Image (cartoon, grey):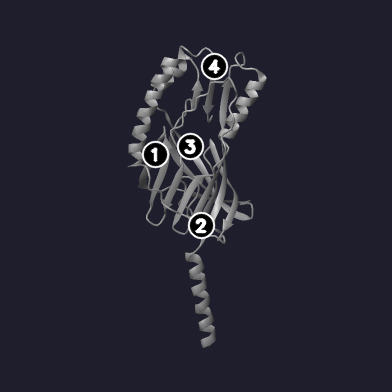
Amino acid sequence: MKKTITILLFTCVIQLSNSQNFQGEATYKTSRKLEIQLDSTQMNSDQHKQMMDMLKKQFQKTFILSFNKEESIYKEDETLDAPRPSGQVFVMVNTGGSDLLYKNLKELRYTNQIESFSKLFLIQDKIEKLDWEMTGETKFIGDYECYKATLKREVEVQQSGMSINGDKDFEDELEEEPEMKEITVTAWYTPQIPVNTGPENYQGLPGLILEVNDGTTTMICSKIVLNPDKNVKIEEPTKGKKLTQDEYEVIMEKKMKEIQESMRSSWSDNKGQNVEIRIGG
């Protein structure tokens, strides 16, 4: 009887130790839906193909999520930029992204290190509580059985994510107040990996989130390595101008207005391409 108790206690200690040291890395492939309008009178078929290939690669990226029971860090897998078609003028307004996103699930906070407009920012704020609704639906992603959860949220309607267009209608769009709409986010998580994190700012489910789709962007896990031989490195970023998410958004809004003014002044000189690229649907 004593031997049995000893063995059971020893097993529990091992399981607890393994749980505390649980860690892994998940690789995510991302893609984005694009609605593209190109002026065929200003662009031949070869140029059109080059532009489409470039845009497709621009929005197909790979990210690595390193995680343990309490923390995670999400960053883009470094790749070479896609070549741009020669002789083309192409403008992409990028207000930033999750260059390095650290989440502390135990303390319910995050640190997002972002480089925007050649400046480094360090956004530190609380993790948003997400009101997930379980649907009961299941499917397999690779070898993992996943469960479906959905989330409603308000987002700004993207009128024109990128544009090179002298159209007066587009200028009017820049003056309008942003329009909001409700979207449904669909996530698939697996309880087989017992961490409540996921890609980008998605978390709060009883298992690792392996797939997310918000109607415009899709993120899906393509590879998982659990408890690798080499310890997973998770370090909170510390460099950059410290501010909250709201403070960062105020700065970006001001910067976008400056860009809009610059675009208006250059439209009269834009005699070449008439290209409008809308992100989403």
Label 3 neighbour load within 10 Å: few <14, some 14-19, many 20+: some
Does residue 127 appear in the picture of this structure? no
Label 4 neighbour load within 10 Å: few <14, some 14-19, many 20+: some
Position of residue 258 relative to residue 272, above or below, is below
Contact flag, marks 4 and 2 (Cβ < 8 Å) = no
Depth check, mark 4 against mark 2: the one in front is: 2
Contact flag, marks 1 and 4 (Cβ < 8 Å) = no
Find the distance from the CA under tag 4 to the CA under tag 3: 31 Å
Image location (x, y in percent) of residue 115? 42, 38
Element marked by disc 3: strand
**Mark 4 = which residue?**
274
**Mark 3 = which residue?**
183
Find the distance from the CA under tag 1 to the CA under tag 3: 30 Å
Find the distance from the CA under tag 1 to the CA under tag 2: 25 Å
Residue type beneath disc 1: Leu
Depth check, mark 1 against mark 4: the one in front is: 1
Position of residue 209 relative to residue 33, above or below, is below
Find the distance from the CA under tag 1 to the CA under tag 4: 33 Å
Q: Quadrant of residue 40?
A: top right
